[in-house]
Image (cartoon, rainbow, N blue to C red):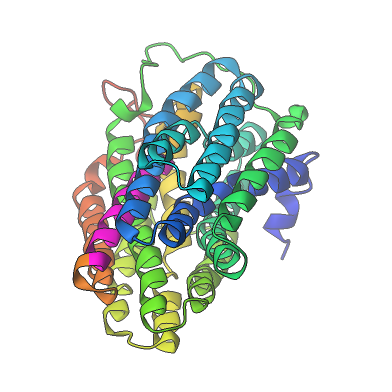
Amino acid sequence: MPNPYKEIFSVPGAKSFSAAGFLARLPIAMAPIGIVAMLSQTRGEYWTAGAVSASFALTNALIAPHISRLVDRHGQSAVIIPATLVSVVAFAFLMLAANRDWPAWTLFASAFLAATMPSMPAMLRARWTEIFRGRPELNTAFAFESAADELVYIAGASLSVGLTVALFPEAGMLASTVFLAVGTLAFVLQRSTEPAIRQAEAGVSRNSAIRLRSVQIITLALVFVGSTFATAEVTTVAFTKELGQPGAASLVIGVYAIGSFVVGLILGALNLRTPLQRQLLVAVGVLALTSLPLLMADTVTLLALAIFVSGIAISPTFITAFGLIERRVPEAMLTEGITWVTTGIGIGMALGAFLAGWVVDNFGAQNGFWLSVAASTAATITIALGQRSLAGGRTETVAGTVPQAAE
């Protein structure tokens, strides 16, 4: 049986832009939790740390789709470079403000400006779509990207926390900023695989992809999925500290990735015939069920085991969500459509980090896991209620759906 992943990376330039993109998107996970870890050490409280992190993540989530819309219209290189430059400079000021104990407003101002960081997962998927549009290899490429995203969200957070705890408070954020600068530069230099600028199809509005019903449903669901990640991560950092083993946070968060990464790669090699909207419902349902063991963990070992189990459904959730977006969003709006999904994750992580910080400070560390359970349950309800809309034809317009056969 041929290896489908070997086939997609046999395309000239695929390995290069994928490797560069992996580095460039590490800050998606490293920065929010890195801000929490940095400021909780320098300021001594989780509320401020969570609020600054939420400000960055929420602002980035709101700005990123507009940046991606500009990318759809003007090309990746023309937009990504200036946006990344602003973000890198702002991160540098944020680290300096934390180190020098500058007023709190400087932390929030830096976080707002750093939010111009582009959505690299969307840029990567746009390149794979350009290469494999209309071919079965695109599903494998999306599966790889979803597994890589999941690894970035979990391993990136683990690396950020680990560096901060082991070295100095700003270490995680410093590494994140370097990855952003170097990875983005290497990515935009890969011009041969950059997607062509596409004109909107006749009769298709190009105002905003968020006006599509399917994008709205999936984005809302992934707000709750992102909240599940963030609340679990922030609570883990606080809980391991409460247990007297703060260094274990990096390892515990890291095991989040192992099972999900493997499951995601296996799913990408299969050609499942179950409709994608039903696959997504199963994935978020499993995510909700596997969050329950987090409530019973009272040692670092049990916490690591519970985190491992709860991470199994993450990659399948990403794979099916982005697969649905690719089928439902017009080509000229694809980058923006994908970005709205990642925006949902970002908004969820922002709100989750803020709420988890508040719960930890006021009710104790372990109670933060109740937020993970609530968020994953809400994601399941959202997808369940949206099954009819998600089951439409291949391409949706703002006014409705193009009359094609449903999946």
Q: Is residue 335 in the magenta section?
A: no
Q: Position of residue 311 (x, y in %)?
A: 43, 69
Say above or below: 152 vs 134.
below
What residue appears at the point 33 percent right and 84 percent down from the top-left corner? 297
Above/below status of 279 relative to 204: below
Quadrant of image for the N terminus: bottom right
Residue 12 lies, in percent from the top left, at 81, 39
- Depth check: 78 or 298 in front? 298
Residue at image point 66% right, 48% down:
23
Residue 131 at x, y percent in the picture: 67, 35
Note whether residue 225 is visible: yes
Can you say whether 112 is above or below 363 in the image?
above
Q: Is residue 349 magenta?
A: yes
Is residue 23 or residue 398 the one in the foreground? 23
Q: Position of residue 19 (x, y in %)?
A: 72, 48
Secondary structure mostly taken by the magenta-highlighted segment of the chain: helix
- Bounds of the magenta span? 342-361
Q: Quadrant of the C terminus?
A: top left
- Where is 286 relative to 331, above or below? below
Q: Residue at x 54, y 37 (%)?
A: 93
Locate residue 57: give its quadrant: top left
Residue 272 shown left or right of residue 196 in the figure: left
Tell me, yes or no, if residue 407 can be seen here: no
Q: Nearer the viewer, residue 242 or 220?
A: 242
Q: Which of the 4 image quadrants contains residue 236?
A: bottom left
